[in-house]
Amino acid sequence: MHALDTEKVYSLEDLVSWPGEGVSLAVLGHPVKHSLSPAMHNAALAHMAEREPSFRDWRYYKFDVTPESLPEALPNFAAAGFVGLNLTVPHKVVALPLVASADPEATRMGAVNTLKRTEAGWIGANTDGYGLENALREELDARLPGATVVLLGAGGAARAAAVRCLDRGCARLWLGNRSSERLQELVRQLEKAGLGERLRTFLLAEPPAVPADAILINATSVGLHEDDASPLDLRGYREPLRVFDMIYRPPRTALLRQAQEQGWPNANGLAMLVHQGVRSLEIWSEADVPVQAMQQAAEQASSQS
Ligand code: NDP
């Protein structure tokens, strides 16, 4: 049974004396102190252990790992007996060439957030798109097939979202970004992945007209600071939109407040975080994962942090 502290931030030095018993999982990030993942996963594992005793000695930890040390860290986690890893900022893209193989969706996204240890080495997946699609359905009753999606941002989160929307058959994807360079780079990556049709682009300074009920997703980092303005001024839109902000801390960004004022359906990114975690734990455990337990733990941990 693990006697380690799942709230503590561990470092690579701790791997040297990592206890061999039990099944260890972890999130690697830099910084990682405020990650909600240990609370979510350990709550889910406690529920799973009630019906399946083999999960009693599964624990999920957090490790602060710099991007420079990731190449040497991954084999060390395998040697220390870890069976699954989540990767968060800034590791998702740099880890892709470090894994033995990655599934096709992660390859198209250019990033991995979930690693599973196998005899062949770490294999990678990306559960962010799954998390997004489930959150849209659960929170906004919004489905991707046939939808018009307006996606703000051109970084890693936007690329994962764009691949999922196009893979799942959205009718039209509007991609909007502040800088034209990064926007064009994202378009090139999507074209290279065979996903170049159905795309429209715009700069945030020149927002387009979009049909009613379009799904608007914020995948920019605008809103992370309490006093950030909305990345797109929703007051210019007459037709209702369904608005999803990937940001969950703070819980109500200026974008979501504007959507609320317009009376439109809106939700923050906490459910996306939960569902990507659910899918990761399914991959590692090959068992049913209690969504409700993860959701409650995420809400509680996020309100305390
Ligand atoms: P990146 O740093 O890769 O991309 C940031 C994006 O934000 C770029 O498109 C950038 O535009 C834009 N941006 C930054 N500052 C401004 C500004 N002042 N005005 C307009 N646009 C701006 O970040 P990620 O893609 O990794 O993450 C984006 C967001 O998604 C973060 O807030 C992150 O927390 C969230 N996220 C949430 C998840 C969840 O589970 N809920 C999962 C993953 C991410 P430009 O190209 O012009 O610089």
Image (tube, grey):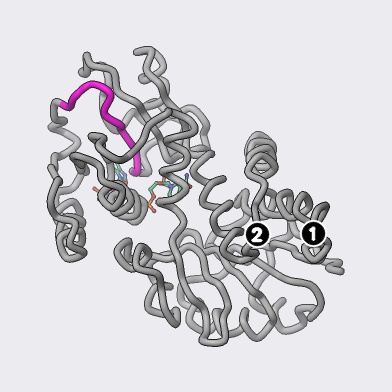
Q: Is residue 193 visible?
A: yes
Q: Residue at x 13, y 43 (%)?
A: 201
Q: Is residue 24 left or right of residue 253?
A: right
Q: Residues within 10 Å of mark 2 (few under 14, many from 20)?
A: few
Magenta: main secondary structure: loop
Dot 1 amino acid type: Glu
In the rendered image, residue 297, in percent from the top left (x then y), is placed at: 69, 42
Q: Is residue 108 left or right of residue 195?
A: right
In the rendered image, residue 42, in percent from the top left (x then y), is placed at: 73, 54
Question: Would you say the beta carbon of the disc 2 residue lies within 8 angstroms of ligand 1?
Answer: no
Compare residues 277 and 249 and report the one nearer the observer: 277
- Residue 218 in magenta? yes
In the rendered image, residue 80, in percent from the top left (x then y), is placed at: 69, 82
Q: Residue at x 83, y 62 (%)?
A: 53
Dot 2 amino acid type: Ala
Callout 1–callout 2 Cβ contact below 8 Å: yes
Instruction: Identify residue for label 1.
Output: 52
In the rendered image, residue 37, in percent from the top left (x then y), is placed at: 62, 53
Q: Which quadrant of the figure has residue 159?
A: bottom left
Work out how far the residue at label 1 is from the one at label 2, CA to CA, in angstroms.
10 Å
Q: Secondary structure at mark 1?
A: loop
Question: Would you say the beta carbon of the disc 1 residue lies within 8 angstroms of ligand 1?
Answer: no
Q: Residue at x 36, y 35 (%)?
A: 143
Magenta stretch bounds: 210-219
